[in-house]
Amino acid sequence: MFLTLQSLMTLEIVLKLFLQEFNGLGIVLENRYYGASYPFNTSTTDNLRFFTTEQVIADTAHFAQNVILPGHNATLQAPKSLWILIGGSVPGGQVAFAVKEYGNIFWAGLASSGLTKGVLGYPEWYDPIQKFAPQDCTASLNGIIDKIDTVFANGNANQIHHMKSIFGLETLHDNGDFAQTIAYPLGNPFLYITPTWQEINWDPAVGSSEFFSFCHNVTNPNSPKNITALDYALAPYTDNEPWPNLGNYANYIKKYLIPTCGDVPVNNSACFLQHNQSYWADTTNSLRRSYLYTMCTEMGTYTAAHQDKPSLVSRVLKPEYTQQWCTWAFPPGKHNKIPSTPDLERYNVYGGSNMSAPRLAFVGGEQDVFRDVGFFAVDQGERYSLTVEDAYLHPQMLIESGGHRWDFEALNTGNVWEKDKEPQFIREVHLWELRVVARWIGQWEEREGRGSKRDEL
Ligand SMILES: *[C@@H]1O[C@H](CO)[C@@H](O)[C@H](O)[C@H]1NC(C)=O
Ligand SMILES: *[C@@H]1O[C@H](CO)[C@@H](O)[C@H](O)[C@H]1NC(C)=O
Ligand SMILES: *[C@@H]1O[C@H](CO)[C@@H](O)[C@H](O)[C@H]1NC(C)=O
Ligand SMILES: *[C@@H]1O[C@H](CO)[C@@H](O)[C@H](O)[C@H]1NC(C)=O
Ligand SMILES: *[C@@H]1O[C@H](CO)[C@@H](O)[C@H](O)[C@H]1NC(C)=O
Ligand SMILES: *[C@@H]1O[C@H](CO)[C@@H](O)[C@H](O)[C@H]1NC(C)=O
Ligand SMILES: *[C@@H]1O[C@H](CO)[C@@H](O)[C@H](O)[C@H]1NC(C)=O
């Protein structure tokens, strides 16, 4: 039995490989407070009181122990039968937590790019971009951001207005809103409406390489004079130093980002104006509101600028910017109130980025924006299996040059895995995953006293 945890009902293609290879049964379980699984019609602070990671993973255990599947009886329930959990991103973290907490119910689990650690501010989100993106692009952006922050720090209203108008955003009075808007093409993982670094994928049919188009624009050496002239427009505010590639950056925002709003003006909350209490206070059920609640209450991971290093986004984007949304979105109710900053202990109780459990497999991406809140966090040092026993009991694989959940895509047409069409670095991850699952099945059968029926792949 393969149980995929999901925020929303979508099928991870890798699940199909497992079902095909092992003739298993697959179930996709949607999290409470998402999609069709809301217990209430609105998401007021009170109605959200049953929405905790602890409860979400308890749902999983309850489901596996009690479900009666059509055409089957109770013998398929966990732990009478072999159940393997699968999940990526936030559900990847939940898989890891559930295997650790309910190891007597679930035999094993595969967590891909799992967010297992909560932090308040998360400037490391931008680190893979800073490190792996074309350096003429990142250096241009670092320089422009330094100058933008100088103008903000100077506090001259006319200069700030002029600077915003270069991007066509002078009607955004809140500096955070302006900073957040020009960060969209880079990645603004909470409110993103356009593809970012996170959406790059090895399979072009699934992902988007718009990030690279953005960089091509920023670094375009052939831009017309009327665009490159803008590099000098703000020089009087920065000791007459020009702002290299400002014209290119601003042109991309005006030509490709602002038009995504259609007829809505940029200074409307349906477009880029976020500094609006009643907008956040809207209690309509939504994916975004549920995710924000998890961040505000226990996970944090507020994307923010590096304050003391080169930054790709303005340093006005501090954790306080996101915390303001939490405070506006979830005013105290009668039965529930959110903490003044996320109660990270509730999320980190399972062990954070150094958590482990028997037969819990971790897959990560070298260039994943969420790498630093998971098992392969850079601050954990090098990770590798020291013995075969360790590689079997604590399977782990970091995908070279991989991004967020890259193993969950596969080339599968009909019910056939097109192994030979996958790039080698992904095919080898899938082959490894099939070996890992085969071993788990073998170990289960051995424990059941039936002996291993399956040759190792
Ligand atoms: C949700 O709204 C529907 C229709 O307005 C109503 O019948 C139902 O009782 C409500 N459910 C809850 C849990 O409030
Ligand atoms: C469940 O079904 C299997 C065969 O499908 C049968 O052997 C078994 O006795 C059933 N168990 C129960 C508890 O009904
Ligand atoms: C700028 O970005 C747009 C939108 O993605 C793209 O169509 C265009 O080719 C890019 N321009 C350059 C010079 O790369
Ligand atoms: C630059 O000039 C071209 C034509 O000469 C015009 O189409 C374009 O809109 C101008 N761009 C800007 C940013 O003014
Ligand atoms: C938005 O900007 C326009 C000017 O472009 C202005 O007339 C309007 O009042 C602004 N709306 C808000 C809500 O600030
Ligand atoms: C602020 O949010 C409210 C509620 O969503 C909305 O009606 C209003 O138009 C928003 N204000 C602006 C300036 O967009
Ligand atoms: C991670 O956990 C292992 C095993 O519990 C321990 O040996 C190691 O020191 C920990 N690493 C860090 C960085 O805390």
Image: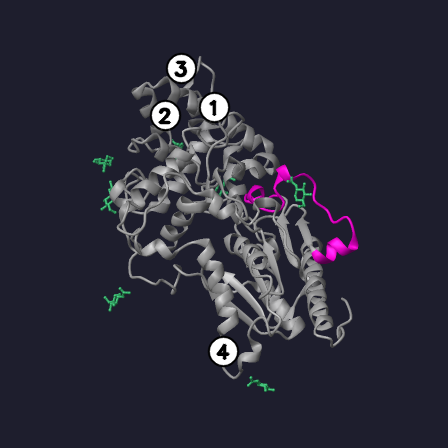
Q: Amino acid at mark 1?
A: Asp
Residue position marked by numbered label 2 in the rendering: 163
Q: Amino acid at mark 2?
A: Met
Ligand 6 quarter of the rendering: top left
| SS for callout 3 | helix
Mark 2 vs mark 4, CA separation in Å: 62 Å
Characterize the local packing of mark 4: few (<14), some (14-19) or many (20 or more) Cα atoms within 10 angstroms. Answer: some
Residue 432 percent across, percent down from the top left = 71, 59
Q: Amino acid at mark 4?
A: Ile
Mark 3 vs mark 4, CA separation in Å: 72 Å
The mark nearer the N terminus, 2 or 4, is 4
Quarter the C terminus occupies: bottom right
Choose between 232 and 122: the one closer to the eye. Answer: 122
> Start and end of the magenta stretch?
367-393
Characterize the local packing of mark 3: few (<14), some (14-19) or many (20 or more) Cα atoms within 10 angstroms. Answer: few
Q: Which mark is residue 441?
A: none
The mark nearer the N terminus, 2 or 1, is 1
Mark 3 vs mark 2, CA separation in Å: 11 Å
